[in-house]
Amino acid sequence: MARRIIQPKSKKPRRPRKPEISPTKLRMFLECPLMYKLVYVTKIGRYYYVPNAGNSFGGSLHRALQDFHSSGGHETQTPEQLAERLKNTWVSTGYNSRQEEREHLEIGVRLLQDYYENSKSGSVTLMTERQLREDMGDFVLIGRIDRLDERPDGTIEIVDYKSGRESVTEAEVANDLAMSIYQLLAKKKYPDRQVMATIHCLRTGQIASASLSDEELTELEKMIRHVASEMLKITEDTEIPPSRKRICDGCDFYKICERRARIAGIEWGSNENPDTAE
Ligand code: SF4
């Protein structure tokens, strides 16, 4: 009997994924295009990442709150259960000693108990720790939100937790790039609703909110499209000229940054110490 030859199904060529632009990428590009290139284009940034206590502490609190709200929040959970969630989601890396880690865990439990007592509202939580996405043509705009609530009057409220910050004002929320982008993404998802953004400082319980008008959101979208088109031109070969910006203190690339040396007027590779030349 003649054997039937089964032809492999021809696979449709996959369309390349569109680049994703997040508030973090945009902010980094606006602050220092070279840092953006090192982290997101050449990707050597990952070899310079040093875990730190602030990131571990913030991440642990965020995950505990995510679990709390996705399990029913105040309706079904007790403060003790919320504290227990922190112990389950705790990340130990980045602390200088066991003592420092223990102290942070105690602070975290206290912050969550305060959060439990002071954050009851008539709002309904629609999602937690979720990425919102919007196809913008050449790229996809993304934003990871901590919590998205529907207030009793139907307003959509994005809530962002800050674990290191102690205070916040309405003006700071209104001028915060990430909070503005979250509002734009929420408006695309809920076009008929009023949207607003709130920053909740977990250390003090301070809260401030702001809401962009439709005109402001349109302006923001224009700005994002313009900056994104510049970002997407950057390749591994792109030369980034020195600028006079002074944001280098604390940068992970401080020691290896040729651009910083050029800003300081030093020939790269010479024995001159950039730290003393500036
Ligand atoms: S050291 Fe300064 S110029 Fe260099 S990547 Fe960092 S922020 Fe940018």
Image: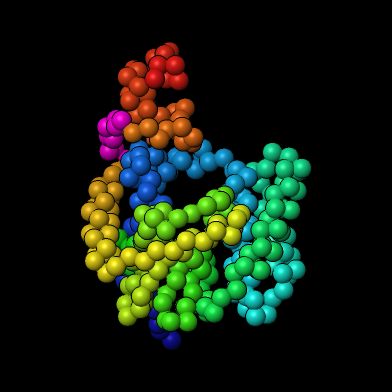
**86 is within the stretch colored magenta:** no
Where's ligand 1: which quadrant? top left
Magenta-highlighted stretch: main secondary structure? loop
Residue 92 x, y percent position in the rendering: 69, 49
Q: Where's the N terminus, which quadrant?
A: bottom left
Pick the residue in front: 173 or 1.
173
Pick the residue in front: 266 or 83.
83
Q: Residue at x 36, y 66 (%)?
A: 211
Q: What is the span of residues highlighted in magenta in the rendered image?
A: 236-244
Pick the residue in front: 92 or 110.
110
Q: Is residue 268 above or below residue 66?
A: above
| Residue 186 appears anywhere in the view | yes
Q: Residue at x 32, y 19 (%)?
A: 265
Residue 45 x, y percent position in the rendering: 46, 41
Residue with the most extreme bottom position = 1
**242 is within the stretch colored magenta:** yes
Residue 267 x, y percent position in the rendering: 34, 17
Q: Quadrant of residue 95?
A: top right
| Residue 142 appears anywhere in the view | no
Q: Residue at x 74, y 65 (%)?
A: 84
